[in-house]
Image (cartoon, helix red, strand yellow):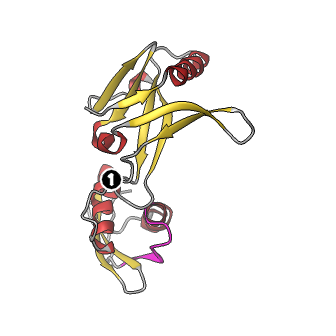
Amino acid sequence: MSKITVTPPAQAYFRKIIEKQKMDGLAIRLTVTNPGTPGVECGILFCPKDYITPNDEHFKLDGFEVVIDAGVTQFLDESYIDMGKDDKGEDILTFHAPNLKKKVLPEDASLFDQVAHFLNSVVNPSLAGHGGAVELVEVSADNIVKVRFSGGCMGCSMVGATLHDGIEAQLNQAFPGMIKGVEDVTAHAVTDATYG
C-alpha cells in the first residue's frame, strides 16, 4: 500500500471544500495522467462515492477519504500534501509526489518502445470500449508516429477525429516536443466490426 501524507492543515482545507459540495460520501481522488512518460502529471479531484471502484486504494482521514486507482499508486507513493503560500501570500494546496516520474520502461527505452507502451496501456483500453484498437507501426526518423487501426476502428467515419483529436493530442501531452505528427497507415474497409 502506498504511503500518502496529508498534513492537518491540508485535511482541514479538504474538509472545508467537501462540506461546501453538500454530497454525501464525497472523497478526494489523487490522479496520475500519462504515467511513465515525460508528460506525466498528478492532480487532485472530487470523487463522488459512485465513482469509487474496487480497484481503488483507500486512505481514511478525519472526516473524509482519499482514493487512488491501484494502477497508479506506485507513482504517488510517499506523496505529501500540505498547505503553502503563493506569490501573493494566499493559502494554496501543495502536492509533492517524489515518485511521479518513476520509469515504467528502462532508462534507455527507445521512443518507439515508449510510444508503443503508451498506446497499449492508455489509448487501447479506451478504444476497446468501441471494439477497436491501434498498434504502433513505426516512429520515423523525423518523429512521425505511424499507427494502424483494427477492430471497430476499421472503416469508422470518426477515425480521423480519433487520430488527431484523441491519439495525437494524448501523445503530444505525454511526449511534449518529441512527436512531430501522427499518421494512419491503415487500409480502411467497412466490416461487420466497424463501430458506428
Using the image as rendered, state which of residue 164 and residue 17 is in the foreground.
17
Answer above or below: position of 165 versus 94: below
Task: Give me the residue at 59% from left, 18% from top.
Answer: 16
Task: Give me the residue at 39% from left, 56% from top.
Answer: 196
Residue 166, magenta (yes or no): no
Residue 31 lies, in percent from the top left, at 42, 40
Using the image as rendered, state which of residue 115 and residue 101 is in the foreground.
101
Task: Give the residue number, with chain letter if any, for mark 1.
Answer: 102
Q: Is residue 19 left or right of residue 119?
A: right
**Amino acid on which disc 1 is placed:** Lys
Using the image as rendered, state which of residue 38 and residue 147 is in the foreground.
38
Residue 56 lies, in percent from the top left, at 31, 31
Answer above or below: position of 66 versus 182: above
Say which element carries label 1: loop
Q: Is residue 82 left or right of residue 1?
A: right
Q: Quadrant of the N terminus?
A: top left
Task: Give me the residue at 44% from left, 13% from top.
Answer: 62
Q: Is residue 98 left or right of residue 124?
A: right
Do we see residue 120 in this rendering?
A: yes
Query: Which quadrant of the structure image shows residue 87?
Result: top right
Q: Which residues are magenta?
A: 174-184
Answer above or below: position of 15 versus 97: above
